Structure formats: structure tokens, C-alpha cells
Image (cartoon, rainbow, N blue to C red):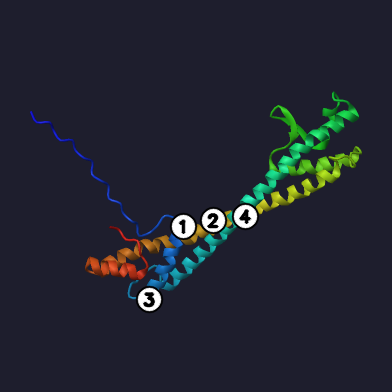
Amino acid sequence: MDTPTPEVPATPVNHNPLIPRDQDEKIALALLVAAGWLANPQLTLFWKTPAQFQLDVQAAAAALKLKNQTAAKRPQVTLALDEIDQKITDGLGYVKGYLAEKFTKQNAPAYYEEFGITFYDDQHQLARKQTERAAALVMLVDALTTYGFDARDYGAAYWKPLRDGYATATGAARASAQAVSQQVGVKNTAMDEVEDVLSALPLLITANYRTDAERAAKRREMGYLKEYN
């Protein structure tokens, strides 16, 4: 009896898509197609003109650029907050020590709340949420003055820059997040229009040109440089 020859799985065909998924590449393609469509007014869509499409592409490109620029700055803000958080951790133990020295170790926790120090995660520390931590730093600086710790090594001179820097950094973080969210909305709206046209024009080319060679040449002329194989 002959041994059956095992079937070899078919090798999948790799296709180069006409429209890339990456948004930066998609915008680069759309800019080429916008120029190509303006040069080929014989190709018409009832619901979009070449001039309108060019405006859509420009809007999407501008929104994507601004979103990328804003997002690129966010790691700097995060780094600033991380550095301040580390200094808070370093300094808070000394503040607790000042309170223990003044009021005894047993009684010191009774004053923690006035210094913005709360108990959670099995330890006394400043709040972790940004808004609450910013408020706690204000309380801490005020309490240092109230209880006469201004001149200590970890007194007001140490904490005031942290209070001010944290407020600035958290404000920048919120502004960055809001700006990115806004630009994402603008970009998505414009990109939807862009993607509709990018998808429709190849079909229009296929319908208007009879041979594969003519269609391929027109797609290249219109900016579709990555074609299906």
C-alpha cells in the first residue's frame, strides 16, 4: 500500500494594501491622492469634490501633527512628576520625625492630617491622586509654618518648590491630555472623510479603465504606490 503524500499547506499570498493602516503613512498617501485627483477631474464622486477632499486631507494632517507634537511632550511632564514624587517620598519621613520630636512619636499621628498626610496602603503618606496630592502639598507647607518648622532642613524651603512644581506639572498634564483628546476628535472626523475617498477612488479607477495595465498606471498616477499583487 502506497504511503499517502502529506498535503503541504498553501503559502498565504501577501498583499500590499493600497491604503496603509498607519495614520502617518495614510496621511502621506492622502496628500499624494489629493494632488492626483485634482489633476484628474474626469474622475467624479457625487458626494465629494477634489477640492473638498484636499481640505479634508489638510485638516486631518494638521490635527494629526498637533496630536503627535502634544503627545511627544507628555513623557517630559511625567518625568517631572516622577522626580517630584521621589522628593516627596524622601522628605516626608523627616517631617514625621519633626512631629515626633515635638509631640512624641505616639502623639505625632494626630497631627498628620493637618500636614496633608493620610493613612492608606498600610502607611502614612500623601495622597497619590494628582489633585489630592497637590492639595496635600499646600496643606503641608502651611502646617510647616504654623508649627515652626520653616527653618528646618526639610522645612518650607524644601517643600515650597515641590508644591509649586507639582501644581505646574499636574496642570500641564491635564492640559496635554485635554489637547490630545480634542485633536483626536478633530483628526478622527477628518480621517473618516479621507478614508472614504481613499477607498472609493480605486473602485472608480477600476470602473473607468478597461485593462489591468491602465488601471495600475492610473492608480500610480493618483498616488497609490502600494498595489495589491
Q: Label 3: state its secondary structure.
A: loop
Q: Label 4: state its secondary structure.
A: helix
Per the image, the residue denoted by label 2 is: 184
Residue for point 29% across, 69% down: 217
Q: Where's the N terminus, which quadrant? A: top left
Q: Say what amino acid the circle numbered 1 marks.
A: Gln
Q: Determine whether 48 is above or below 101 in the image.
A: below
**Res 192 → quadrant:** bottom left
Q: Label 2: state its secondary structure.
A: helix
Q: Determine whether 126 is above or below 36 in the image.
A: above
**Res 99 → quadrant:** top right
Q: Is residue 132 visible?
A: no
Q: Say what amino acid the circle numbered 3 marks.
A: Ala
Q: Which is in the foreground here, disc 2 or disc 4?
A: 4
Per the image, the residue denoted by label 3 is: 39
Packing grade of label 4 (10 A; few <14, some 14-19, many >=20) is few
Mark pair 1, 4: CA separation: 19 Å
Residue 52's spot in the image, x, y percent?
45, 70
Q: Is residue 147 left or right of residue 166?
A: right
Mark pair 2, 4: CA separation: 16 Å
Residue for point 27% across, 67% down: 215
- Give the number of the disc on residue 23: 1
